Amino acid sequence: MSTSDRVRAILHATIQAYRGAPAYRQRGDVFCQLDRIGSRLAEPLRIALAGTLKAGKSTLVNALVGDDIAPTDATEATRIVTWFRHGPTPRVTANHRGGRRANVPITRRGGLSLDRRGVNPADLTDPDG
């Protein structure tokens, strides 16, 4: 049984215990929170990495994924906030201020490299923020 399976089993047992407890039968907010937690368990795992320059963040991403997707170099290799998401093929999308989105050409040389010509880093924004 995986850790996720054990957590789901604990959550299910918790819901059953609350349903049987008279003090919680009328507490819809408790069941709403437990349902929300259950829904999050079905979503992809999200990991945030932050650190100083050359701290090994890209190396850790590559190790977690099992592939060289984050560029690494002896000098600074990543200068912008980067979101990695699972997909069938590698692709990079620049999210510009004002809502414009543009695909950025990439190559695979020791990680994914992108051609930033024509992409002003000051014009990029967090797609989820």
Image (cartoon, helix red, strand yellow):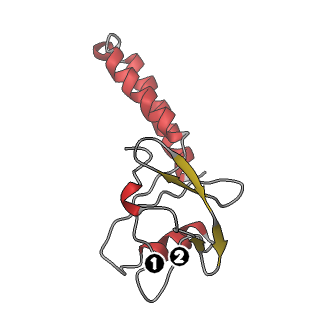
Residue farthest to the front, as pictured: 118
Circles 2 and 1, Cβ within 8 Å, touching? The answer is yes
Residue 64, label in figure = none
- In the depicted view, which residue is nearer to us: 83 or 98? 98
Which residue sits at x=36%, y=79%? Answer: 55
> Which numbered disc, 2 or 1, marks the residue that appears first in the sequence?
2
The residue indicated by pointer 1 is 77
User: For the residue carrying disc 1, how many other residues have a C-alpha within 10 Å: few (<14), some (14-19), or many (20+)?
Assistant: some
Q: Quadrant of residue 89?
A: bottom right
- Could you tell whether 17 is left or right of 51 in the image? right
Percent coordinates x, y for residue 71 in the rendering: 53, 76
Percent coordinates x, y for residue 84 in the rendering: 53, 58
Percent coordinates x, y for residue 70 in the rendering: 53, 71
Q: What is the C-alpha distance between the residues marked 2 and 1?
A: 6 Å
Percent coordinates x, y for residue 34 in the rendering: 41, 29
The residue indicated by pointer 2 is 71
Residue farthest to the bottom, as pictured: 74
Q: Amino acid at mark 2?
A: Pro
- Could you tell whether 64 is left or right of 88 in the image? left
Q: Amino acid at mark 1?
A: Ala
- In the depicted view, which residue is nearer to us: 3 or 106? 106
Which residue sits at x=46%, y=61%? Answer: 82
- In the depicted view, which residue is nearer to us: 105 or 113? 105
- Could you tell whether 125 is left or right of 105 in the image? left
Give above or below for 75 relative to 47: below
Give above or below for 56 relative to 125: below
User: For the residue carrying disc 2, how many other residues have a C-alpha within 10 Å: few (<14), some (14-19), or many (20+)?
Assistant: some
Q: Quadrant of residue 22?
A: top left
Which residue sits at x=41%, y=42%? Answer: 98
